[in-house]
C-alpha cells in the first residue's frame, strides 16, 4: 500500500498499491496515532461536483491505532478528497487527502 499523508495532521492514509481504482470497490487503511479516539469516520467527496461516494464505507478496528476501511468506491474520474474525521473528547479533527483520479487511476 502507498501512503498519502496530509502535512498538518498525524493521520496517515494507506492506499492500495497503484492507488484507488476507478469505479471499483477497494479497501484502504487509516493510521491514527495517539490516544484511542471515540470515533473515526472515513468518507470521500468530489468538491467540484458537490457529491460524494455512492457507498458507505465500513471501518474495522485492527491493532492499536489502525483501521481497515472497506467499501470505498470512487465512481468517476476527477478531483476527490478523502476525509478522515477523528473524534477525541468530543472534538472532531478532520484530515483531508486530495487525489486526482483519471481513467487509468490516480495521477
Image (spheres, helix red, strand yellow):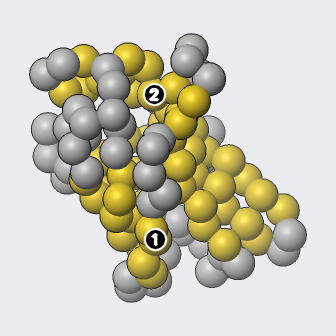
Could you tell me residue 18's position as x and y percent? 14, 38
For residue 107, say whether it is visible: no
Mark 1 closeness class: few <14, some 14–19, many ≥20 residues within 10 Å:
some
Q: Nearer the viewer, residue 82 or 35?
A: 82
Q: Nearer the viewer, residue 5 or 28?
A: 28
For residue 18, say whether it is visible: yes
Q: Which mark is residue 59?
A: 1
**Extreme residue in the bottom direction:** 63
Q: Nearer the viewer, residue 52 or 64?
A: 52
Q: Which mark is residue 20?
A: none
Could you tell me residue 64's position as x and y percent? 46, 83
Could you tell me residue 83's position as x and y percent? 56, 44
User: Taking 37 as reference, is 69 above or below it?
Assistant: above
Q: CA distance from mark 1 to mark 2?
A: 20 Å
Quarter of the image where one finds residue 35: bottom right
Task: Locate residue 64 relative to residue 51 in the image: left or right.
Answer: left
Task: Locate residue 67 relative to residue 41 in the image: left or right.
Answer: left
Residue at mark 2: 80
Secondary element type, mark 1:
strand
Of the numbered discs 1 and 2, the one sitting upstream in the chain is 1
- Residue pictured at 35% horizontal, 37% vertical: 74
| Quadrant in which the C terminus is drawn | top left
User: Taking 61 as reference, is 98 above or below it?
Assistant: above
Quarter of the image where one finds residue 66: bottom left
User: Taking 65 as reference, is 40 above or below it?
Assistant: above
Mark 2 closeness class: few <14, some 14–19, many ≥20 residues within 10 Å:
many
- Residue pictured at 39% horizontal, 27% vertical: 99
Amino acid at each position: 500500500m502507498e501512503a498519502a499523508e496530509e502535512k498538518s495532521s498525524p493521520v496517515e492514509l494507506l492506499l492500495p498499491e497503484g492507488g484507488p481504482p476507478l469505479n471499483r470497490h477497494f479497501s484502504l487503511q487509516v493510521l491514527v496515532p495517539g490516544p484511542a479516539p471515540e470515533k473515526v469516520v472515513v468518507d470521500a467527496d468530489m468538491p467540484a461536483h458537490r457529491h460524494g461516494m455512492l457507498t458507505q464505507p465500513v471501518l474495522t478496528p485492527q491493532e492499536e491505532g489502525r483501521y481497515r476501511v472497506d467499501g470505498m468506491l470512487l465512481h468517476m474520474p476527477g478531483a476527490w478528497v478523502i476525509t478522515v474525521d477523528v473524534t477525541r473528547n468530543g472534538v472532531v479533527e478532520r484530515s483531508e487527502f486530495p487525489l486526482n483520479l483519471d481513467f487509468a487511476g490516480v495521477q
